[in-house]
Image: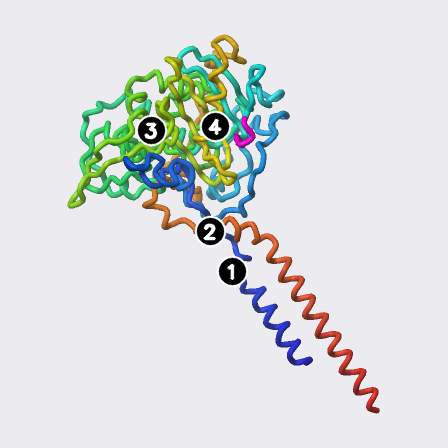
């Protein structure tokens, strides 16, 4: 029996030392969930806009997921200066890289929900920050932690879209490179040698959150560094105070930051741009192939557009560190309303676009003039931030989001049940080791007692 107990103890110790669940878990795919493209018979398009990983960020490490059961309390403005701590290595600094200096805080008190009397925030809206506003008048209908700093994920692609629309001819032809096609993260599916118009690249950018299209547009605009400078300059021109685009695609990187209020200013300008408004309000287009590959139908990944009869488009986003982000708008009786959601989760059921929809539908009963404020650009925003860009607009070791199913193979298969149990497994092993040690000790003691008795 003693030998049996010893063998059992050794087996358990061996299992404890080699157990795979004690090693760092591979990261989940990250960013805009472009997921499977909707089809005419299935507008939602499978996992749609919130889960497949829109920006396509494959992080090198990720922490054990936690499930949110209620919206974070932001009354004390916990994110007035910087976004929440990252759970991956996306913001790990490269050797010698200086830490980014945060922009000055814009709001440091009273950062909870502000809404008109009678406006109810549905319990399923788990966003850390949100803003609902009238696109045309700028009236803010409801908001939560409007100047809190959060990561935008792919919804920051709006800045790249606006710059490209302003500077490039939509009919201009661009020949894709291998570097474009191999861009990290979500992809619309452009290929080396494929010829695309700027408009088609914009379709891939805003309808499918393609990082390959983003990279191609950046090269047409002068390269990664020039483009990153341009998108930050555009944010500055629009009067933002909380926004630093550390990448033009939404990939997480050191210093990445925005706020619901800033995104309100940015998307107000975007929806007022006829070209952008048309692009995001397109449910599907014929997208060209390349080489021997034929073209295909490209469908919009925005669930609000595809499922709400009043939807007029927007943008999806997701990374492990940003969580789910979303911008969507509706035209309700001639009144264009938009909802911006930052840092929400969807494990409880409703996806990000459905949470935005709840806020928008609740705003229908709020008449013009009954809101809680008005979007107004900063009169003298701080100097345009300087961002160090690498060849790929993500700092070394930064996590990269993942939008498209074509990149999901690189991601760790995510099992919510198993991942929830992982934190307890190490304690279970320790308990079993202790139990077997106790059994071995008892058996040894009993064996010793028997020998004395025989004497």
Judged from the image, the secondary structure of the residue bearing numbered disc 1 is: helix
Residue 58 inside the magenta-drawn segment: no
In the image shown, does 52 or 46 lie closer to the viewer? 46
- Residue 341 numbered tag: 4
In the image shown, does 79 or 219 lie closer to the viewer? 79
**Whether label 1 touches label 4, CB < 8 Å:** no
First-in-chain label (2 vs 3): 2
For the C terminus, the image quarter is bottom right
Q: How far apart are marks 2 and 1 (CA)?
A: 11 Å
Dot 2 surroundings within 10 Å: few (below 14), some, or many (20 or more)? some
Dot 1 surroundings within 10 Å: few (below 14), some, or many (20 or more)? few
Which residue is denoted by mark 1 in the rendering?
20
Position above or below: 329 against 351:
above
Where is residue 130 shown, x and y percent of the image? 51, 25
Q: How far apart are marks 2 and 3 (CA)?
A: 31 Å
First-in-chain label (2 vs 4): 2
Location of residue 168 (image quadrant):
top left
- In-image side of 439 versus 138 (left or right): right
Where is residue 20 shown, x and y percent of the image? 51, 60
Which residue is denoted by mark 2 in the rendering?
26
In the image shown, does 205 or 249 lie closer to the viewer? 205
Judged from the image, the secondary structure of the residue bearing numbered disc 2 is: loop
For the N terminus, the image quarter is bottom right
**Whether label 4 touches label 3, CB < 8 Å:** no
- Magenta: main secondary structure equals loop
- In-image side of 246 versus 71 (left or right): left
Which residue is denoted by mark 3 in the rendering?
227
Q: How far apart are marks 4 and 3 (CA)?
A: 26 Å
Position above or below: 408 against 313:
below
- In-image side of 249 versus 190 (left or right): right
Q: How far apart are marks 2 and 4 (CA)?
A: 27 Å
Start-end of magenta stretch: 122-126
């Amino acid at each position: 029996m003693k030998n049996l107990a010893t063998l059992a103890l050794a087996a358990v110790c061996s299992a404890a030392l080699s157990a795979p669940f004690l090693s760092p878990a591979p990261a989940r795919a990250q960013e805009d969930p472009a997921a499977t493209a909707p089809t005419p018979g299935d507008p939602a398009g499978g996992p749609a806009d919130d889960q497949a990983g829109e920006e396509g960020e494959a992080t090198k490490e990720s922490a054990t997921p936690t499930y949110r059961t209620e919206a974070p309390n932001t009354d004390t403005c916990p994110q007035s200066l910087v976004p929440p701590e990252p759970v991956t290595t996306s913001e790990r600094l490269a050797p010698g890289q200086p830490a980014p200096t945060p922009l000055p805080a814009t709001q440091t008190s009273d950062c909870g929900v502000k809404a008109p009397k009678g406006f109810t925030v549905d319990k399923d809206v788990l966003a850390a920050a949100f803003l609902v506003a009238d696109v045309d008048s700028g009236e803010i209908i409801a908001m939560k932690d409007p100047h809190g700093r959060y990561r935008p994920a792919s919804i920051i692609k709006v800045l790249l879209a606006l710059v490209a629309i302003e500077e490039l001819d939509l009919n201009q032809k661009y020949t894709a490179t291998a570097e474009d096609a191999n861009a990290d993260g979500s992809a619309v599916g452009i290929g080396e040698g494929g010829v695309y118009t700027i408009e088609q690249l914009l379709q891939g950018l805003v309808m499918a959150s393609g990082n390959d299209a983003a990279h191609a547009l950046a090269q047409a605009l002068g390269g990664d560094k020039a483009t990153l400078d341009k998108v930050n300059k555009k944010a500055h021109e629009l009067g933002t105070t909380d926004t630093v685009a550390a990448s033009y695609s939404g990939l997480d990187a050191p210093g990445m930051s925005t706020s619901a209020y800033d995104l309100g200013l940015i998307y107000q300008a975007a929806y007022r741009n006829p070209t952008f408004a048309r692009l995001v309000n397109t449910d599907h287009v014929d997208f060209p192939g390349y080489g021997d590959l034929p073209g295909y139908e490209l469908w919009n990944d925005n669930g609000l557009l595809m499922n709400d009869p009043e939807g007029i488009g927007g943008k999806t986003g997701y990374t492990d560190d940003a969580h789910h982000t979303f911008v969507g708008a509706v035209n309700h009786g001639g009144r264009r309303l938009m909802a911006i959601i930052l840092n929400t989760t969807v494990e409880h059921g409703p996806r990000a676009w459905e949470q935005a929809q709840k806020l928008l539908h609740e705003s229908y009963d709020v008449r013009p003039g009954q809101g809680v404020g008005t979007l107004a650009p900063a009169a003298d925003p701080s100097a345009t931030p300087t961002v160090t860009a690498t060849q790929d607009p993500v700092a070394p070791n930064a996590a990269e989001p993942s939008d498209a199913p074509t990149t999901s193979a690189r991601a760790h298969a995510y099992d919510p049940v198993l991942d929830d149990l992982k934190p307890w497994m190490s304690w279970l092993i320790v308990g079993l080791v202790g139990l077997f040690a106790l059994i071995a000790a008892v058996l040894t003691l009993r064996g010793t007692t028997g020998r004395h008795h025989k004497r």
